Amino acid sequence: MIALEKMQRRVRFRRRMLLGGWLLVGLVIVARSAQVQVLQATEWRALAAQQQQGSATVVAPRGAIVDRGGVELALTREVFELAVAPGEIRPAERDRVERAVAEATGLSLREVRRATRSQRAWRVLPGRYPPRTREALRGLRGVHAARELRRHYPHRDLALGLLGRVLDGHGRGGVEQAYDTLLAGRPGREIFARDNRGRPIPGETVVVEPPRPGGTVVLTIDRDMQEIAQQALVEAVEANEAEGGDLVLLDPHTGDILALVSVRDGHPGALSAINTPYEPGSTMKPFTVAALLELGLASLEDRVDTEDGSWQVMDRTLHDVGEHERVLTVAEALRYSSNVGIAKVAQALSPSQQYQMMRDFGFGAPTGIGLPGESSGVLRRPDAWSGQSGHSLAIGYEVSVTPLQMALAYGALANGGRLMAPRLVREVRDAEGRVVERIAPATVRRVVSADVARRVGRALIDVVEEGTGTHARLAAYRLAGKSGTARAVGVDGRYERGAYHASFAGFFPAEDPQLVILVKLDRPKGAYYGGSTAAPVTRATLEAILAARNSPLDRLAIARSARGPARGGRDGVARRFVRFAALERPVPALPPIESDPALSDRVPVPVLEGLSPRAAVRRLHALGFRVVLEGDGEEVRTEPAAGVWLARGDTVRLLTGRRRGDG
């Protein structure tokens, strides 16, 4: 009996223990469930959402860069990647979908069917497509589009170095880098649904924070002038077998840069006009003369003995190139580019006076153009000079300058002695087109008096008319300028044997300047003097600008500056016409351009079949048309079509596409 009771008590105890255990497990489960669903609900919901959803940055459309007239030089295009999900296409609709995709994309039906009949869940179609293609395919089951933004340069390599490029969403070089923050805009944010493998589900995307598009940068560059300058320089570099070169066009009264081109290895993608200094040689001589006149230390009529073109200075001998009288006036020393004559008269300047005048003209200091990588050049202080430095500096040695610095200094002579700051950007606009910053022209300082600038300018007219710059001479207008030739320095810091920089700088028209031009060729082969290489390029460029009727020049003022017969006669500005595209080798000597009064202001659109887009643009510009270039291919056609008669100055659309057979 006792044993039975003990057994029953043991069974009852075990039952209670088992029941208590189950109750305890239940309580733990309930507590854990409460913890997950109540206390940790937010955390677990976020984890679930993370597995089911994803988020991504929405890139903002990058702002445009336009020229002074609003012509787009850089813009952002919306393109689409197209993909097919074969499993989503109903069998009864497959043929219709395939034909619609082939028609909209231009792909062959066979290529489309390889995607739509694939065993894979997802097939991306080759290429990128414009919005109109996406719209044509909108609503088709199984066809999906992913938006992309691509930077587009409609004029290809035009102003390539100046504009820069965009890499990985950031500006690299030029305006793209200098104004990267403004152009880039502000990115947005989107969320999208994921499938069970974590992949985004097409069409299941919601933008939760829209991107803010970038602003627009309006440049001072003139598209047509840039085209003319670039073509002139590229052809000159090729014709003279030079390693490179630079060409700068600017307005002396505002500092506006109208064109800036640098060519290296035959390609216009460099920016050496602002970041690579060189010894200028004789183009520095007008500033030496200006300093002497400003300080009252000499006059243009003073006479100097040039020692028959050979003068010993300490352990160095200065030589003149070319024949001239032994005794010259200061004006004649400038006209014939006498090294001996200019170096002799420069002895009247003290080192501090010479240094200060060169600094005042902008040498040895950055111009403040605002582009990355600008060089200050080299102008040592007088306490670092040797006994020969004064003579060397007077004729453009022992000093290095950038082409832009030299162009701005000539601009000071053309602007009545006032040096202007360079202006590359006219204004900045926000995404809505409102002007948020307008950059006004800025005077840096007055360097010399208006009278001194006028007298030096008059002497520079003689340089072109009768001196070393005659290859730059224009038939109908006077140009003031100076050629320069200087030995080139190698990577070891020593002068290279037989290597030179040839240059020409000046302003036009000489009596009422509207344009400053600087041309420099690096290490040309064969002829290497600036007067015989860079001067003809100057002339060809100016003649082409005169033919481009939409250039930002005051043509009435230019007409008033014409030589006597040009006022309404055969050389009248309204009848001048230059077939610039035909200038194959802009080297000496180009014949004078003769104007034909029978030339009509209306000409037919030419046949451009077989030409490259750039050659077609040059041909149209040569005929006086404005050109709007559209497309990315190599095959060209025009609207209006070839043969239609238009007025010079009218706009022709040049449409480019892929040649048949291109992949």
Image: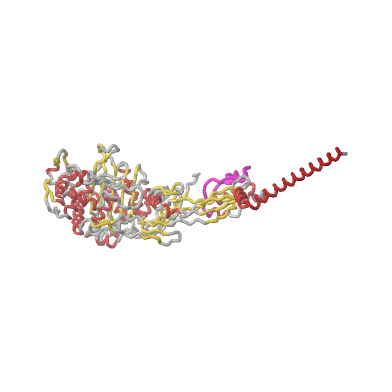
Side (left or right) of 631 relative to 514: right
Q: Is residue 426 visible?
A: yes
Whether the magenta-drawn stretch holds residue 121 is answered as yes
In the image, residue 228 lies at what x, y percent? 34, 52
Foreground residue among 388 and 106: 388
Q: Is residue 538 visible?
A: no
Q: How many marks do you count on the picture? A: 0
Tell me the magenta residue range: 106-132
In the image, residue 294 lies at what x, y percent? 17, 55
Foreground residue among 222 and 490: 490
Give the vertical position of 412 relative to 111 (above or below): below
Q: Quadrant of the N terminus?
A: top right
In the image, residue 301 lies at what x, y percent? 13, 53
Q: Residue at x 12, y 43 (%)?
A: 308
Q: Quadrant of residue 218?
A: bottom left
Q: Residue at x 78, y 44 (%)?
A: 16
Side (left or right) of 310 relative to 603: left
In the image, residue 553 lies at what x, y percent? 31, 59
Say how the picture is coloured.
secondary structure
Q: Residue furthest right?
A: 1
Q: Residue furthest front?
A: 2
Give the vertical position of 444 relative to 498 (above or below): below
Side (left or right) of 519 relative to 210: left
Q: Residue at x 24, y 41 (%)?
A: 487
Foreground residue among 174 and 90: 174
Whether the magenta-drawn stretch holds residue 498 is answered as no
